[in-house]
Amino acid sequence: MQNNDVVLSVNNLVKDFPLGQSAKSNMMRAVNDVTFELRKGEALAIVGESGSGKSTGARILTRIYDKTAGDVTFKGEPLDKYIEKNGELEYARQVQMIFQDPFGSLNPVHTIYHHIARPLLIHQRAEKEAIPQLVYELLDMVGLSPVKETAEKFPHELSGGQRQRVAIARAIAVSPEVILADEPISMLDVSVRLGILNLMADLKDKHGISFMYITHDIATARYFAEKTAVMYVGHMVEWGDSDNVTQNPQHPYSKLLLSAVPEVGKAGRRDLEVKKGDIPMWKPSSVGCPFATRCPNATEVCSQEMPATTQISEQHFVRCHHI
């Protein structure tokens, strides 16, 4: 049954990449059997270390990559049908992306005004004479003032946090339904990260924008997102309400991520036993649990069979043979 609040849904998503120039028989599976829903005005955090497939999934949703298998539904329609009916440009307007590098995603030879005015013109969001006022309003919305002076500057004249606010202003300029935020604070100073998270939370709560928040920092996922999915080597290993996943983690990999989060008032680190196995390169022919080579609880079955999904509570799921 289709829930009217579900803006974007992904079912059994798979993405394979060829290894070198070889034939299709030699492939790496970057995303394997990923399923989730994104509801209106809700944030879903995708958490995992580098190489877990987080950004690949986002790039499939923005059509940068084609999916190998699986289904993507947007506003209740299969994505291909939605695009056939409404066009690629309209889908691009509705699903925007914020990239990790706030400098690399801006053109250094153009002013801030140009960066925000251009999507307004491309997507015909206003008459040309109304564009300047809209640009100033967007800069004010993301906390960049004085707005006229900021609009005249070039990216190199702004701090990293200010550049990321410009990227957010550019994304929201076209009134999207969904924003895919790919590590939006990882390259920023700690002192400005909270400001960016609070800005995105404000957009989510006041404007109903849905966020897919990609991060390796499970602590910020708990702070910003209502739902959290933990990924390892292209697989979702644990997912559900953020409070459940972060306060009562069940998968050994989720526990490992949380053990790396510093706690105020506690000296030292909470060390967790982990095998020093290699992170596997997953292939279409690979079997077993992807975390088996590093898991302290692994048994023979872990290397032979993919764990089934176990429901811990109403909004908490995990894939592990030993739950």
Image (spheres, helix red, strand yellow):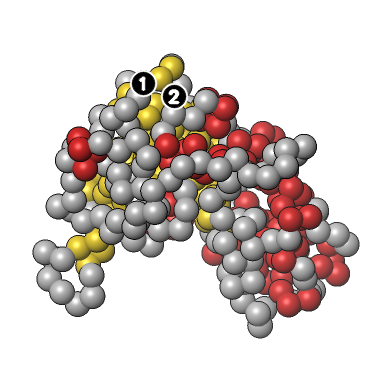
- Between marks 1 and 2, how big is the CA–CA gap? 6 Å
Q: Nearer the viewer, residue 289 or 51?
A: 289
The correct choice, above or below, for 95 with respect to 107 in the image is above
Image location of residue 211, percent across then percent down: 55, 42
Q: Secondary structure at mark 2?
A: strand
Is 20 on the left-hand or right-hand side of 122? left
Q: Which residue: 76% across, 49% down?
A: 195
In the rendered image, which quarter is residue 105 located in?
bottom right
What residue is shown at x 45% (from left), y 22% (from top)?
315
Q: Are marks 1 and 2 in contact (CB under 8 Å)?
A: yes
Residue 132, relative to residue 318: is it above or below?
below
Quadrant of the image for the N terminus?
Answer: top left
Question: What's under tag 2, amino acid-wise?
Answer: His
Q: Amino acid at mark 1?
A: Gln
In the rendered structure, the answer to whether residue 111 lies left or right of residue 12 reads right
Nearer to me, 296 or 116: 296
Q: Which mark is residue 316?
A: 2
Q: How many marks?
A: 2
Residue that lies at the very extreme toward the bottom in this rendered image: 109
- The vertical placement of 186 against 109, above or below, is above
Report which quarter residue 68 is drawn in.
bottom left
| Nearer to us in this view, 95 or 132 | 95
The answer to whether residue 55 of the structure is visible from this angle is yes
Judge the density around disc 1: few (<14), some (14-19), many (≥20) Cα neighbours within 10 Å: some
Image quadrant where one finds the C terminus: top left
- Residue bearing the label numbered 1: 311
